Amino acid sequence: MKRLAWLLLFAVPLLVHDEVVLTILVFTYILGMLAVSFNLIFGYTGQLSMFHAAAFGVGAYVTELAMTHLGVSFWVGMLLAALFVEGISLVVGSICFRFKLREFYFAVVTLAFSEMVRLVVLNWNSVTNGSLGINLTTKPTIWIPTQGLIPVEGTRMWYYLSLVALMAMVVTCTRIVHSWMGRCFAAIRLNDGLANALGIDVFRYQLVSFLVGNAGAAIAGALYAYYLGYIEPGYLSIDQSLAIVAMVLLGGRASMIGPIIGALILTALPHIINFSAELRVMIYGLILILTILVMPKGIVGTLAALRAAPAAAGSYAKRSDVL
Amino acid sequence: MFFEAQNLTKRFGGITAVSDLSFSIEREEIVAIFGPNGSGKTTLLSLIAGVVRPTAGILIWKSRRLEGRPPHEIAAAGIVKTFQNPQLFAELSVTQHVMIAAHLRLQRQLGVRRIKTLFRADGGSAELADRVDHVLRLCRLTELRDEPAVSLSYGAEKMLGVAMALMCEPELLLLDEPATGLGQEEIRNLDGVLRDLRDHGTTLCVIDHRVGFLGRLADRAIAMHHGSKLAEGAPGDVLRDAGVVEAYLGRPHA
């Protein structure tokens, strides 16, 4: 079932020739990676991190800087960016988790760190070109058996690149979530006192989840920047953090597919109806409020509950038969 | 020395919950701790498990100091405590609870190699399946294994707490009122499980108000009152001790 769904996604460019649709899907996949990696921290480990946009933005900037100043390829640059983001995340995460910041407090402190990073990016003109941002002229290259090393250009190639990247992210996160490490994350989310009593090092696994999630954001940032062709400090903005939270809440935080569905809706929406940037932020806010009020489990959670409801009613009937 | 507490004191603000208490536990014995409500029993277990830090005094575990270390390190060192009020991961199933509690077992078994299990589809749960089945059967939770913890009765919640503690494979198991909320039949089963544990080398320290159950089970008893030790010795003797009777029932009139 899941394999079939992935196969179908690979077939989409063969069936759909509309550039706009494919472009929306490329953005969906890349932002889907961002949302899935965020959900590892938020949905599975229970930490509302507002640092994700910073990891996303820094990932984009450091990839570019590494390529320009060190002369490395896009992929090496991306790897260096991920490592750099891990370094920052280690500092931010260690501080937050050592002081046992929870929920609201964790969100506020990570937001403050995120803003600090954004202000550095905004004001360090000699390196980041400040608010003007950087135009990216190079493209990532991939090696194809018959053609050798070719640049990734055009919507179709980006479609496959972003789909493979998303798939890799989903597979990695699924493995983690279903492993002993995922059980540690769930234990921390649901009852950290009990997790601690059972011998789980809460600090360590909070940090691991934060690091893995932010590495995912850095990789998504690098891809996003090179697809779009420019980087600007807006990547690290609160709006971006809010958009990520909105994607996950709208799609549903208790699943892997939920954040991707959220990413799809929030990417497609501005294209279907032409919103101005200011209005878009307002729409995100509205969606957030409505989701929390009407369907706190998100689209996927609500659908799952609807599907489970008749079954539950059936088992109840069975029990009353016994009585 | 297996386990020893010396001059252990815990004050919460102006209240002294545990006051200058010294005692020791020998390997493979069952120690009962008696005492009326508020006598400091639960605080004592919390101190040993590292949930609260002692104000003064020291704890020695296999000739190493224990006080001030965080709960997960103490659990990893071999001391695990169950909770008086069942602590659960609400939405998860009984089996998932026991799987989470297998963390230390996996850590001991595989060490750093457990990272490798992340690349396998089952994520390292195959190693645990037999052990999980065994613990569930022992605690009579097999039939409830797929139930979410929120739907369990109080007695089943208590047994799930014991099951999780067993999964940690402690050398010293601290049980805070394990029999509360259990029926006669369930208490008999618990009694069997705990004796079996002791026979297989686990040391137990148990608090309970079911003095009949615990009096028969324990090898030795300590009675507490106002955070201090009132009496110590064979369970029967301790329960007949005039001071203990008075602490529990009050001074007889007339």
Image: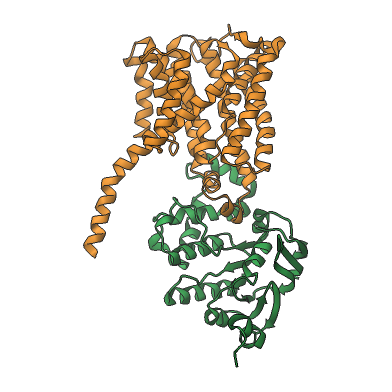
Chain colours: A orange, B green
Q: Is residue A253 above or below residue A242?
A: below
Depth check, front residue: B152 or A21: B152
Question: B193 and B181: which one is in front?
Answer: B181
The tally of labels here is: 0
Residue A80 seen by the camera = no
Residue at coordinates 58% horizontally, 34% vertically from top-left?
A: A107
Residue B202, located in which quarter of the rendered image?
Answer: bottom right
Q: Position of residue A138 (x, y in %)?
A: 58, 8
Residue A31, image x and y in percent? 48, 23
User: Residue A196: percent from the left, percent from the top?
Assistant: 61, 52
Placement of the N terminus of chain B among the 4 image quadrants: bottom right
Task: Identify whether A23 is placed above or below A246.
Answer: above
Identify which residue is drawn at 69% across, 33% down.
A91
Residue at 33 percent across and 37 percent down: it is A303
Please name whichever residue, B225 or B216, is drawn nearer the observer in this view of the structure: B225
User: In the rendered image, which quarter is residue A305 located in?
Assistant: top left
- Residue B157 position, x and y percent, is 46, 62
